[in-house]
Amino acid sequence: MLRRTLLGDVWLVFARVMLPVLRNPVAVIFGLSQPLLYLGLFGPLLGDGGWQWFVPGLLVQLALFGTAYAGFSLLPEVRTGVLERLRVTPVSRVALLVGRVGKDVVLLVVQGLLIVLAATLFGFRASPGEVLLGLGLVALLGVAIGSASYAIALKAKLEYVFASVLSATIVPLMLLSGVLLPMSNGPKWLYWLSRANPLAHVVDAERSIFNAGSVLLGLVSATALVLIGVFYGVRTFNRESA
Amino acid sequence: MIKARGLARRFTTKFGPVEAVRGVDVDVAEGELVGFLGPNGAGKSTTLRMLTTLLRPTAGEAIIAGHDLLTDPAGVRRNIGYVGQKNGSGADQRVRDELEFQGRFYGMSRTQARRKAADLIERFDLQGTENRLAVTLSGGQQRRLDIAMGLLHNPRLLFLDEPSTGLDPQSRRNLWDHIKQLRADGTTVFLTTHYLDEADFLSDRLLVIDHGLIVGEGSPDELKNRVSGDLVVLGTPQAAVVATKFSNAAVDGEKVSFRIPNGDRALPSLLRDLDRIGVELHSVQVHRPTLDDVFLTMTGRSLREDASAA
């Protein structure tokens, strides 16, 4: 028997959920269709110079939509006895969450990279350093939202409950983040409402990365979201009867 | 192998607290195959979930496979195997992968896990399914895969929760053979069931639970011997007349049933006596006591009725 470590457990859980994806990567490609449509059919409406502003927001949108739905993959494993079986093995319950989130974030980063490459065809320009930083921030956001998504799915237990919780939260988060149009275009109250949305600061930071601006507030927002999301996720996964 | 004292679990629901298990003592010796019998909702699964660290007891204590349930649940988890009521294989996972990962979750190296998985695939007649997705297996195959996963790390103690539920008779019989074999190989097995024939066929010893309390314990034969006498059922238009002759008789239309000791031997002279007083008989049946009778005597209700009503 090998010595167990938390990192080893995370790796095993990650490998178990990653394997089916690697064997059947079609789903990952389909996950790209929505951002690609935005890129091709919405981006050109923004006119010259719009790409540098729009693509970073699109990456944040990808992180939001790509990981918020992650919890759906857990529900069948709760309904059958899969999660229960794993919970009786000595694998750390934290690893059961983190390994899964790890898979979602890896896929997110790969998708983000493909979006950036596709965007350069339209005229988007970024240095490798900027891309690295930009995808790093997107990954942070993915960790936060993915963890929360699994925890909420565990609590919701039923697909239709989970789906309505998602649509009730994701749509306002997205509309108030300014990914599609600048929030400063609207009335003051809408702008100030958007300032209360941590995602809006992440979007601003993502834009700053590709346009040489301040990243600090967005980085703080994203880190806070990670702490909250992971804390909530780990707590929910550790709860014995969840 | 299992020593539990006063295990209890209270659930808080919208309608107030529910005492699912009200303090049970469980003792299982090494190498035993113990059946935990009770109707649906009696507290079987809740007890099992407490013994396997899935649910924290609200009272009581237990030592499982040498580790304290409350202070060292990780130690318990390392040393037991658990096969839940529902299928434990991921729908999008291949059979061989699930087995190998299960071994590695218990700290086996890749080579060890692979070798053990191959052994179990052969032992549980899963050859040819290695590269199939778990979701494509038949019910019997899935169940055997579940048990194989529970055995990957060679646990000395295996918990099975309702192992044969939902299986066709043939797969059920096949599963029973596999479970008997486990015991023959020295594994201690603790299984829950609400099927009397399963409890009868498999168990060395039975614990009977009802309303969250243990109401009986013993080997299937010991338990059956507690029921006084065999059940005799006579079909006759004069059922009421016959019923007056036996203190414990029950009439159901043109049928009368009662219990007498050694029914098979007592029957010939009994029939002659009835003939003499002019009772006309259509049919005669003698039943040895079943576990259902045991259950009826202990709890006042039939396990069969309960199981079919559930």
Image (cartoon, rainbow, N blue to C red):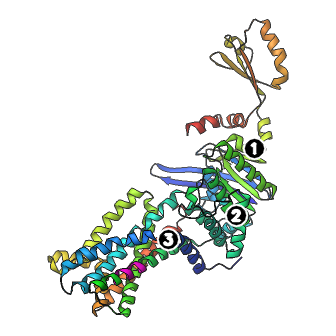
Q: Over which residues does the magenta segment extend? A: A109-116
Q: Is residue A242 magenta?
A: no
Q: Is residue A224 visible?
A: no
**On the image, numbered disc 1 is attached to which residue?**
B201
In percent of width and height, residue A155 lies at 45, 62
User: What residue appears at the point 44 percent right and 66 percent down from the top-left corner?
Assistant: A71
Q: Quadrant of residue B61?
A: bottom right
Q: Nearer the viewer, residue B173 or B257?
A: B173
In percent of width and height, residue B265 lies at 85, 22
Distance from the alpha carbon under mark 1 to that under mark 2: 24 Å
The extreme left residue here reads A187
Q: Nearer the viewer, residue B168 or B15?
A: B168
Chain letter belonging to callout 3: A
Q: Amino acid at mark 2?
A: Ile
Chain letter belonging to callout 2: B
> Do tag 1 and tag 2 residues touch (Cβ < 8 Å)?
no
Q: Is residue A199 left or right of residue B167?
A: left
Chain letter belonging to callout 1: B
How many neighbours does mark 1 have within 10 angstroms: few (below 14), some (14-19), or many (20 or more)? few
Identify the element where label 3 is drawn. Answer: helix
Q: Is residue A229 left or right of residue A61?
A: right
Q: Which mark is residue A194?
A: none
Q: Which is in the foreground here, disc 3 or disc 1?
A: 3
Q: Which is in the foreground here, disc 2 or disc 3?
A: 3
Judged by its main secondary structure, the magenta piece is helix
**On the image, numbered disc 3 is attached to which residue?**
A21
Q: Is residue A31 left or right of residue B260?
A: left
In percent of width and height, residue B4 lies at 70, 58
Q: Amino acid at mark 1?
A: Phe
In percent of width and height, residue A103 lies at 48, 75
**On the image, numbered disc 2 is attached to which residue?**
B80
User: What residue appears at the point 67 percent right and 69 percent down from the top-left corner?
Assistant: B103
